[in-house]
């Protein structure tokens, strides 16, 4: 399976309390993972970018500490996540030309990680 940085399918983050959310992007770093919320580019970095420190393990699903990252399932598997994902897809279809390219996203991630290489 692809490394988490290169997965093109939508990803879901499950927190230690069991809550789940679809995330826009995920970047692996030697000290952990930086992930971006949906609509991250419309918010401040403190609101939309999150740093999970620890060792990333697995090949999909992945684990980091007590968090789990997996690929979004079908509507029957993940009905509670379909609405936010559909809103995100609609936004990208209508505003894709305004959305940052992958290289721009990586530059933002590097800045948020203090200039570290991804």
Image: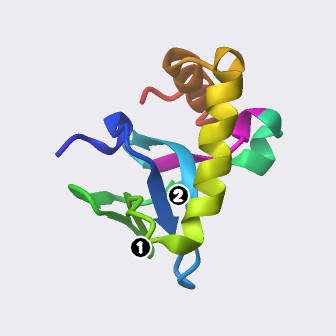
Which marked residue is nearer to the observer: mark 1 or mark 2? 1
Residue that appears at 33% across and 44% down = 4
Estimate the x, y position of residue 44 in percent, counting from the top left. Answer: 83, 39
Give the structural element (helix, strand or loop) at label 2: strand
78 inside magenta stretch? no
Q: Give the residue number, with chain letter if any, for mark 1.
A: 76
Q: Does residue 85 appear to the left or right of 41 in the view shown? A: left
Whole-percent x and y of residue 20? 55, 71
Relative to the observer, which residue lies in front, 32 or 100?
100
Mark 1, residues whose alpha carbon is within 10 Å: few (<14), some, or many (≥20)?
Answer: few
Tell me what residue is drawn at x 56 percent, y 17 percent: 101
- Direction from residue 12 to residue 47 in the image, left or right: right
Q: Going 58% across and 53% down the picture, which residue do you hit?
A: 85
Q: Is residue 40 left or right of residue 19?
A: right
Residue 100, which numbered label? none
Residue at the bottom extreme? 17
What is the tally of numbered marks visible in this picture?
A: 2
**Furthest residue in direction left, as rendered:** 1
Judge by depth and name the residue closer to the eye, 19 or 47. 19
Magenta stretch holds residue 35: yes
Looking at the rendering, the stretch of residues picked out in magenta corresponds to 33-41
The residue pinned by badge 2 equals 52
Residue 63 in the image: state x and y as whole percent.
34, 66
Determine the secondary structure under disc 1.
Answer: loop
First in sequence, mark 1 or 2: give its number. 2
Q: Residues within 10 Å of mark 2 (few under 14, many from 20)?
A: some
Q: CA distance from mark 1 to mark 2?
A: 29 Å
Q: Quadrant of residue 3?
A: top left
Residue 63 in sight from this viewpoint: yes
Instruction: Name the quarter where the C terminus is drawn.
Output: top left
């Amino acid at each position: 399976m692809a490394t988490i940085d290169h997965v093109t399918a939508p990803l879901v983050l499950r927190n230690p309390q069991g809550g789940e959310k679809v995330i826009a992007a995920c970047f692996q770093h030697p000290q952990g993972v930086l992930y971006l919320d949906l609509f991250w580019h419309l918010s401040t970095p403190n609101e939309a970018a999150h740093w999970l420190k620890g060792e990333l393990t697995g090949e999909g699903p992945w684990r980091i500490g007590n968090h789990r990252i997996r690929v979004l399932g079908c509507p029957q598997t993940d009905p509670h996540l379909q609405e936010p994902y559909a809103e995100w897809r609609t936004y990208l279809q209508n505003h894709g030309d305004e959305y940052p390219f992958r290289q721009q996203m990586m530059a933002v991630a590097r800045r948020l990680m203090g200039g570290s290489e991804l």
